[in-house]
Image (spheres, rainbow, N blue to C red):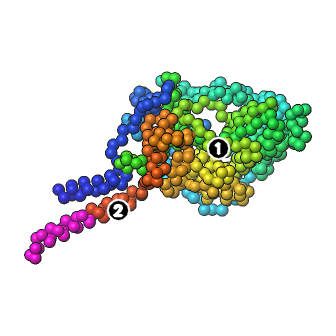
Amino acid sequence: MRRTRNLTLLCTLLAGSGCHRTYVVPETPMPPNTILLSQMMRQLSARPGFTEGLLTVLDGQSKKAPLPMTPALVDELRKRVLGNDWQGLDRFPGWPMREINPTLAIVTKIVQHKETTSAQAGEFLDLGPYSLDKAQTVSLDQPSPLPGFPTEGVMTPLGAGVVHGDGPSALAPEHAESQRLADILNRLAANKLDGAKPFGASISYRPGYLTDASNPNVFTPEDFIFELMLDHRQTVIVDDARYFANFAHLHYNGEDVMAPFWIDSQIVIPHSHGRHLLVPAVHAEYEWHIRGPLINADVSYYYGDDGKSEWRTMDQLDQHWVLERNAHTYTGAQAVEVTRLAGLLTVAYMHQHADHPELPFGGYYTLGVCQDGIAAIEQKMTGTSTLFPNTADMTYFNDPRDAEANALLAAIPKDRDGTPPEPARVFGSLPIAPAANGSEAFNAITIPGLAEDLNVTYAAWQAGSLSRTRHAWIYLAAAVLLVLGVGLFLVLRRRLRTSPAA
């Protein structure tokens, strides 16, 4: 009986230290034409072979997936589906970053910095028709000869009404120009790689277009952007864009499948009996929007789960629930500087691929995720970084050829050792700015249950009353000591009552 009372007391103490009452993950309301991943799997998981086939697809490396699926994550997803744990699937995986980061050996040996090979350039940097080992100057006087938005291989039927991939967006008609622009920016950045042959972009003098001060041949990404902006009719806007990362890029019977990838922020939601604030992983990128008589194109830059730090096209359709927010907008000299910094990071990551070809996932996790490079440039441009999570292991970034890029990445907070992230980064990463009314700050978010959790947590942060989690062993040790103390007190009281003096 005493053991039962003590166990009850211990459970009560632990409940106050992070455990919470059963929380039912809401499934409504949902945005139009959208279904939860759990709702789709309820209907399809019993079909022979479907779950394993879907896991194979999710284990791939798609454009805006938050991270490649490690074996531990694949196993966890399989357990939740096969166990009909639909509540768990709707908050998958819900781990803190210290558990999501794979355990990888720290580099302790001295690395002989290697020259980037043509094969590595082909694997980790998209150059289109251009190559590292050929000197070339490309003229932009004529429209792009590249094909338009691809009609095959973008959306793949998986059977049972399920389709993987996203179709064209409103930017798709510019695909040929955007792809050429991305290829040229990548190849101009690659001029800084050891052994690369000179590559230039040619912009001819034409009456009424470029000024006499312009240079028709440019050899860096930033000079290219600067030349475009010399004529007031050609505008360049660079946005620091944030989205909820789309975990699966799935559609079911014509509906979008909502599948966020949830991270434990280690922030306690007020009045929730210890429940932690889970937030969907975000995708961050810089976006160049170029308009004028010479070029109309839209490209983005980020380090992706394909291991590529590069400029890319951005003309696939985003599902409604991922939203979008431009945290910063740059024009003029600032747009040129963002371009320069993105080029430096592109080269730094190519050096990492040459020095550490053994890293899994093309270095993703170890060398960072999409947020790291964006946060590093944000820190340089604004004096602060507002993105979470950042995972770059700075042990690797010691190549003297990349001193400036290394310093950029070293300046931002990291989320590798389990230290809880600052609330400013958790809220700053979101693809929606908080509304003026704190009680309804994030009501525009359409993921069920998330807006409510964010609203109350954000209000507590603004009021200075936000609680953070403590390590579980601290609570356990305190609880055990308290139980032992109570037990000792009861024993002493009993002895006092039964002693002769009493």
Q: Position of residue 191 (x, y in %)?
A: 79, 47
Query: How far is the residue under mark 2 from the one under mark 1?
Result: 45 Å
Question: Can you give x and y, in whole percent of width and height, for residue 401 in the image?
Answer: 73, 57
Q: Nearer the viewer, residue 387 or 256?
A: 387
Q: Nearer the viewer, mark 2 or mark 1?
A: 1
Q: Residue at x 57, y 27 (%)?
A: 156
Is residue 42 visible in this depiction of the protein? yes
Q: Which region shows up in magenta?
A: 484-502
Camera-side residue: 67 or 474? 474
Location of the N terminus by quadrant is bottom left
At x 63%, y 57%, the residue is 410
- Can the viewer see residue 339 in this picture? no
Amino acid found under the numbered disc labelled 2:
Ala
The mark that comes first in sequence, 2 or 1, is 1
**Image mark for residue 328:** 1
In front of the other: 54 or 347: 347
For badge 1, the amino acid type reads His
Give yes or no for contact between labels 2 and 1 (Cβ–Cβ under 8 Å): no
Residue lying farthest bottom? 501
Crowd rating for badge 1 (residues with CA inside 10 Å; few <14, some 14–19, many 20+): few
169 left or right of 279 in image: right
Q: How many marks?
A: 2
Residue position for label 2: 477
Find residue 69 and report its horizontal and vertical position in percent: 52, 42
Q: Quadrant of residue 181?
A: top right
Q: 474 above or below 267? A: below
Q: Is residue 79 left or right of residue 145?
A: left
The residue that appears at 50% across and 25% down in the rendered structure is 33
Mark 1 secondary-structure assignment? strand
Other residues around mark 2 within 10 Å, as few (<14) / some (14–19) / many (≥20): few
